Amino acid sequence: MELVDYLWGIVLFALFLTCILFVTFGQITVRKLRKNTTTKESLGVEFASGWDILNVAEALALPKVITDRFEGSPISVMFASADVLRKNTNTFDKVLAALFFWLFVFTGVSLLVLSLYMTLFVD
Amino acid sequence: MATALMCEKPTAVSSLNHRCDLQSTESIQTVTCEIPTTLSPYTPYLVGDYSRPQDRGIINPLASMPQSSAKNLMGLVSEFGEDKTVAIAQVMSGLSNPYSTAGMGAATSVYGGRVTGFVGAVKAYEAALKQHKQAISYPGGRQMSKVRIQRAHQKMVKQFNLEVELATAGKKIRKGHPLMNATRARHIAESGRTVAKLELISQLEAQNLVNFSKYTQHLGNGLAVIDFTGRVGSIHNTYKAGGNWEKKMFIEASGFAAGAVMGSLAVKGGLALLTLATPMGWIFLISAGIAITAAAAGASMVVDHQAKKAADRLYDPILDWINSLWN
């Protein structure tokens, strides 16, 4: 069991947590937002089923500076509307969103880095 | 050009004349040139008075198809019809082929016209989305914008269906439209689609059809689940071969989850990068969108492959560790 195997173990565990958090966040927060008439239209474009969960997490977890840039761009329709969402969620939702989103980013980036390392330097 | 026949239940050759439009003079042969009295289910047979060696080659991919895929194929044919299934298989092969734009080759000048039509519809759809933001600030604007978006979306879907229609047009002209030919309509209704008569122009068409039925599950009611990488199939094959299928399932599931997370992050990141850069026109956006999708797909495939290898190595240590927690 070399170092890289332990790293893979950590990343796979993070992947497992990400998927679980994806479902919990979707059920706890996003379902509520989908039903609420004020927020129903502001969840961004749903490329695939469940994509609006990612949109909402992004909107709630990213700092205001970045979400304002998203709002001002020509393709702002594709993103969830952060201002509207922040008004209609409580602190627990925001914490859960931040947890999920940053774990999601960490998992994705580590997967990419590890895979690139394995492809280029091992085998 | 070959006509292949496949049925779901053992069928006597004599009863076939009334179903599926066969003239009594046309003979039916197996792949190995024998003449059967009863057709066994899920095997392809060659129909015709004569068959050149090339035609025989056309149904070879169908003959080497596993029975689960053959069952899928029959389900799809009964749902969508023979011509449409072949056409959809053609269109899907273009989509799932990562080098499809390069492969258009000599046909590009003809295909170019159709691509404009579809891309034009996509552009109109995106323009409608873009105007939505401004529209909702006007009273009554939200409803109007919604209608515009819906119409643009329908146009886009229509264009895609046109692609499929064009692929089936050639075949329809030969056979005649069912509504124009009452006898044919009656035959189709009576046969209940337990017998499929597939008209294939080339071996490539047959191969695309086989690939399509491998990764598509027919669920009935017009629903087909398309699993682009046939993961479930490989787990099932391991189970049937008596291998360690639990391990295979862990490996495939890890690969899928890793690829999915990686891919969705790549798309999200790509979109975010697009906005954080300077504002740009829609044509650039489409090509950038394609680039993002291609990058996401490529990254997803690499990650999937590596995650599967890692899961393979880690399965036994993980199980040992879990067991050690008990003892």
Image: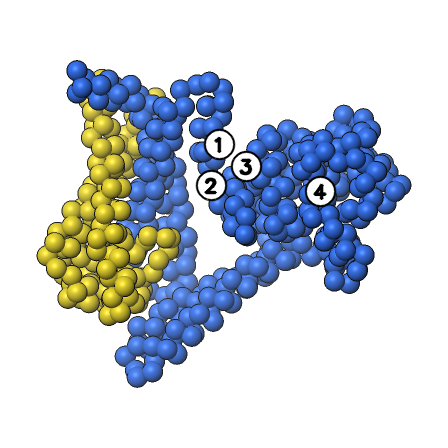
Chain colours: A yellow, B blue
Disc on the earlier residue, 1 or 2 = 2
Where is residue B201? Give x, y as percent: 71, 43
The residue pinned by badge 3 equals B214
**Residue contact between numbered discs 3 and 1, judged by CB atoms under 8 Å:** yes
Disc on the earlier residue, 2 or 3 = 3
Q: Badge 2, how many Cα within 10 Å: few under 14, some, many 20+?
A: some
Marks 2 & 3 on one chain: yes
Chain bearing tag 1 is B
- The answer to whether any part of residue B3 appears in the image is yes
Where is residue A103? Give x, y as percent: 19, 43
Give the alpha-carbon distance from disc 2 to disc 3, as whole Å: 9 Å
Of all residues, the one furthest to the left in this rendering is A91
Chain bearing tag 2 is B
Front position among marks 4 and 3: 4
Looking at the image, residue B267 lies above or below residue B204: below
What amino acid is labelled 3 in the image? Lys
Q: Secondary structure at mark 2?
A: loop
